[in-house]
């Protein structure tokens, strides 16, 4: 087992996998059309989603999400889906309910799942395709891309014509940067384990909540799921990548039977990787909040005088109004101040814009440490993702470092406006100088990002709102207020 991974007693790992990053929603959606479209009778599709829009077009000419899944079900492919129920009055619940009804009416089974901690969400995004009699073709996807509006964008970042609500400064078709990991090999079975554990949770889907009970009846969804079919053996080896699937579940009542104390292997996995970091931590993150989470990186910066940390985040919060903006800015400033105090100029934050100068909304959740350990997942660097919501990430080690290095240099080539064969991209020790000199350079898409300071008057209400609503702590009470996960 790689020393980068958590011990197997905490989370299983596998070797012999092939992991291919699918950067941008358009590339991921095109793969889904190809792979789901090739399924045959007896094959199986399993997926979880934070939000699914039935009419989201997966390519410019379609099919839509609903059309792709309906066609698979018509070929006698088994389709099972777990989608977040969402809280009352939120659009996610309406859209997920609509897609769920379509899946159920065409012979699949979709469940609206709100078995979460108060104020939390099911934020996992996974999709598994298994093939009857063809295990070598089995594939899983894990990452940040939902089957919904705004996600179908590409490297040009012109945006998805089908738009989800976002701050007005991102324009009429917000540019969207995101990523998924395509996985083949034995790790596919570990991704499916996450789906199976949630599906088999005996807690009723509408547990002690009249609103959920009514919503399930309206959507014609059961209180308890039908049993899953008998499991097939894990797929055979497909490559050389080592994979550990990490998760977050909160401590809640009724408890998850598969995580009675909650699960925080994402937090421990990152903490372990940061403790081994020596030269470079590169992060793309939607939020990058939390002084507690930043402490793990701050400790690394203090320990290693040669370590630098580069973070890419959105220029503006998704909802930057007078109420929604300040708690977000407060939380990100906490992290920024902590890391600047620890590493000075060795910690830098950037944001992105497209060729037209429109800000790019960074929704990707990518982390690469020393070109040796990498993750692509649904989790953000904040306390909510590490303790409170359900999350899922794919941690990968390639023994010669080729995969993390190729992912990093490919992302940097796009952001910095350089050809992918530019030798400066591979130079980890020159990373800070390269990013600084590319600010404002022709073709470059990066800008320096410094979170605004929140006034003392605003902080009086923004700080408690941030702690309680935006970045809550889902750990058992004995761990709250500590740096332990």
Image (cartoon, rainbow, N blue to C red):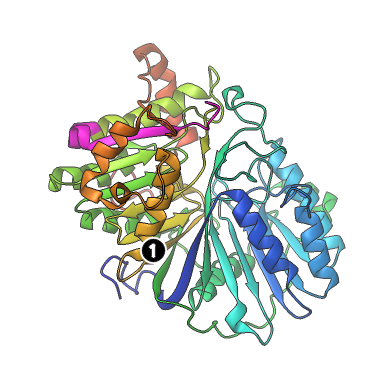
Q: In terms of image quadrants, where is residue 310?
A: top left
The picture places residue 173, in percent across and down from the top left corner, at: 66, 32
Residue 212 place in picture, x, y as percent: 73, 48
Identify the residue at image location x=47%, y=72%.
Answer: 18
Residue under the image location 47 percent in, 63 percent down: 260
> On the rendered structure, is 465 left or right of 44?
left
Residue at the far top: name it: 457
Quadrant location of residue 436?
top left
Using residue 66 as the reference point, say whether residue 341 is left or right of it.
left
Q: Position of residue 188 (x, y in %)?
A: 53, 73
Q: Residue at position x 53%, y 75% from top? A: 189
Picture quadrant where residue 100 is located: bottom right
Who is closer to the viewer here, 111 or 315? 315
Kindly tell me whether residue 53 is visible in this rendering: yes
Residue 446 shown in magenta:
no
- For the point 34% across and 28% down, the residue is 333
Neighbours of disc 1 within 10 Å: few (<14), some (14-19), many (20+): many
The quarter of the rendered structure image containing the C terminus is bottom left
Determine whether 192 is above or below 95 in the image.
Answer: below
Residue 204 in view in this figure: no
- Residue to which mark 1 is pinned: 403
Between 443 and 133, the one lying in front of the other is 443
Q: Please state the extent of the stretch shown in magenta in the rendering.
A: 340-357
Seen from the viewer's position, the closer of residues 299 and 390 is 299
Q: Is residue 350 a member of the stretch shown in magenta?
A: yes
Residue 315 coordinates in the image, percent (x, y): 46, 28
SS type, badge 1: helix
Q: Indicate whether 156 appears above or below 40.
A: above
């Amino acid at each position: 087992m790689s020393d980068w991974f958590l011990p197997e007693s905490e989370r299983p790992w596998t070797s012999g996998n092939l992991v291919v990053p699918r950067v941008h929603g358009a590339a991921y959606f095109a793969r889904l059309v190809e792979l789901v479209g090739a399924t045959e009778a007896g094959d199986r599709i399993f997926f979880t989603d934070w939000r699914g829009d039935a009419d989201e077009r997966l390519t410019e000419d379609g099919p839509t999400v609903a059309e792709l899944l309906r066609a698979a079900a018509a070929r006698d492919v088994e389709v099972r889906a777990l989608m977040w129920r969402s809280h009352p009055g939120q659009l996610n619940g309406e859209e997920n309910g609509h897609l769920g009804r379509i899946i159920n009416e065409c012979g699949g089974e979709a469940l609206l799942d709100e078995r979460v901690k108060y104020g939390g969400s099911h934020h996992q995004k996974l999709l598994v395709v298994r093939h009857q009699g063809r295990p070598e073709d089995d594939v899983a996807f894990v990452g940040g891309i939902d089957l919904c509006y705004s996600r179908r964008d590409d490297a040009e970042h012109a945006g998805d014509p089908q738009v989800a609500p976002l701050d007005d400064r991102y324009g009429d078709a917000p540019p969207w940067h995101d990523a998924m990991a395509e996985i083949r090999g034995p790790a596919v079975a570990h991704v499916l384990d996450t789906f199976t554990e949630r599906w088999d949770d005996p807690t009723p889907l509408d547990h002690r909540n009249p609103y959920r009970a009514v919503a399930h009846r309206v959507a014609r969804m059961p209180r308890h799921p039908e049993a899953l079919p008998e499991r097939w053996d894990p797929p055979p080896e497909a490559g050389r990548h080592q994979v550990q699937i990490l998760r977050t579940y909160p401590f809640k009542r009724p408890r998850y039977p598969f995580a009675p104390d909650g699960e925080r292997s994402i937090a421990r996995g990152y903490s372990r990787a940061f403790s081994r970091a020596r030269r470079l931590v590169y992060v793309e993150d939607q939020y990058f909040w939390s002084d507690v989470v930043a402490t793990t990186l701050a400790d690394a910066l203090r320990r290693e005088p040669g370590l630098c940390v580069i973070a890419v985040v959105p220029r503006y919060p998704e909802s930057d109004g007078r109420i929604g903006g300040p708690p977000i800015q407060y939380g990100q400033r906490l992290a920024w101040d902590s890391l600047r105090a620890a590493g000075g100029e060795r910690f830098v934050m950037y944001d992105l814009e497209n060729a037209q100068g429109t800000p790019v909304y960074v929704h990707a959740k990518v982390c690469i440490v020393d070109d040796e350990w990498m993750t692509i997942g649904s989790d953000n660097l904040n306390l909510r993702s590490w303790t409170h919501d359900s999350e899922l990430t794919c941690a990968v080690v390639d023994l010669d470092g080729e995969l993390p290095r190729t992912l990093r240099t490919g992302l940097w080539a796009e952001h910095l406006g350089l050809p992918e064969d530019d030798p400066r991209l591979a130079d980890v020790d020159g990373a800070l100088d390269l990013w600084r000199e590319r600010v404002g350079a022709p073709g470059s898409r990066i800008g320096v990002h410094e979170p605004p300071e929140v006034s003392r008057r605003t902080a009086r209400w923004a700080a408690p709102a941030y702690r309680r609503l935006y970045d809550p702590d889902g750990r058992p009470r004995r761990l709250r207020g500590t740096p332990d996960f």
